[in-house]
Image: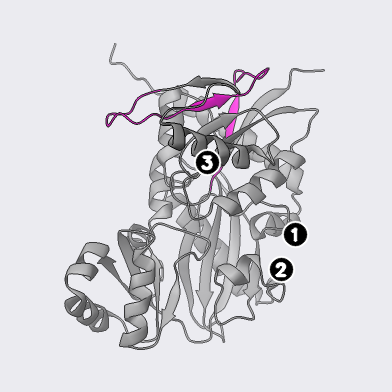
Amino acid sequence: MAERLRIGVVFGGRSGEHEVSLRSAESVMAALDPQKYQVIPIGITKQGQWLVGGDPLKLLQEAADLEAARLSSGKAPTSDGEVLDTSSRDGRLIPVIRYPGTHLPRLDVIFPVLHGTYGEDGTIQGLLEMANVPYVGAGVLASAVGMDKVVQKQLFRQHGLPVVKSVAVKRREWEAMPEETIRLVEHNVAYPVFVKPANLGSSVGISKARDRGELTAALDLAAQYDRKLLVEEAVPQPREIECSVLGNDDPITSVCGEIRPKREFYDYIAKYADENTELIVPAEIPEEVAAQIRDMARQAFLILDCAGMARVDFLATRDLSKVYLSEVNTIPGFTSVSMYARLFAETGISYRELLDRLITLALERHADKSRTKTSWT
């Protein structure tokens, strides 16, 4: 039998989407073909501590206990494992815990299953680029822009793709000049509006505002999660359509799917707790509209220079006369029943095959980038 590829699956992280990441990683690790891959789980705690070894399902709780012990003692614990420390410029320690009897083998590919900040935003991608390790998904630029809803929309507008009217607000401006900020918002967009942290996902920190009072509360909420906020006009009675993309420089698209939340909008509870949320696959829309959405999804993927995977979200008017590009998610939810995988399953690519293709795409992209000269000689 050919030697198995060693796949490092990285999950958890310093993000409001930490728990979502654990669900995705559990599903990915369970589905990777053991005949082809040796799975190496790598957990990151909410405090930024990296752990190698142990049961993937218990890893982060163990990490939390270790972090609590480190904080109470003032140093990293050494009784349960080898601690490898590197000092950052401000003197803090970033410990990597290796449990007894475990070691980190050479990794052929890293599969980041990190949602939100410090994982989906180009930070870990930059680390892996520096280490010259192949990894699944978008590179530094696409990850960073894919996380920033404000910059995304600016790029899409420049390329003529339809997006809803919006205005960006800095947290510092909101806290220092609340009245001026409200006037700025009201000058650029009309109520009702959605207020979002610019760099977060899973609908964390998002709320709807119908007037000044609700706008104030919405900005306060979003400002807890980011220094840059996005306020955008609400599409009346919107239909939420999604399309998955797979590939590198010549990507393919899936069938479209539609989300029908029973709540007012597709918030965190609707996504992960409300069993009444309907996921319609394929979406019940005319083929010409589906073709338009697939084409825009592919364009958005290429505009951001994405790689591997992305789920592209759209908002449409009830009669489908207008379709707006909402955002690109470079590391979408990745359980077998998440929309990204479901859309490709309906297209004819199973969950396990999808994982195989993503790993192959990661190796292909790394091989292509390795052709680039890093010296003038």
Task: Spot the residue most to the front.
Answer: 73
For label 3, the residue is 45
- First reached walking from the N terminus: tag 2 or tag 3: 3
- Which scheme is used to colour this image of the protein? one colour
Magenta region includes residue 102: yes
The one of 251 and 101 positioned closer to us in this rendering: 101
Front disc: 3 or 1: 3
Res. 314 visible in picture: yes
For label 1, the residue is 346
- Residue occupying the point 44% across, 49% down: 117
**Magenta segment range?**
86-114
Tag 3 secondary structure: loop
Picture layout, residue 14 above or below residue 3:
below
Residue 24 in the image: state x and y as whole percent. 65, 49
Which quadrant of the view contains residue 94? top left
Q: Residue 282 carries which label?
A: 2
Which residue type does callout 2 highlight? Pro
Given contact means CB atoms under 8 Å apart, are the residues at marks 2 and 1 in contact?
yes
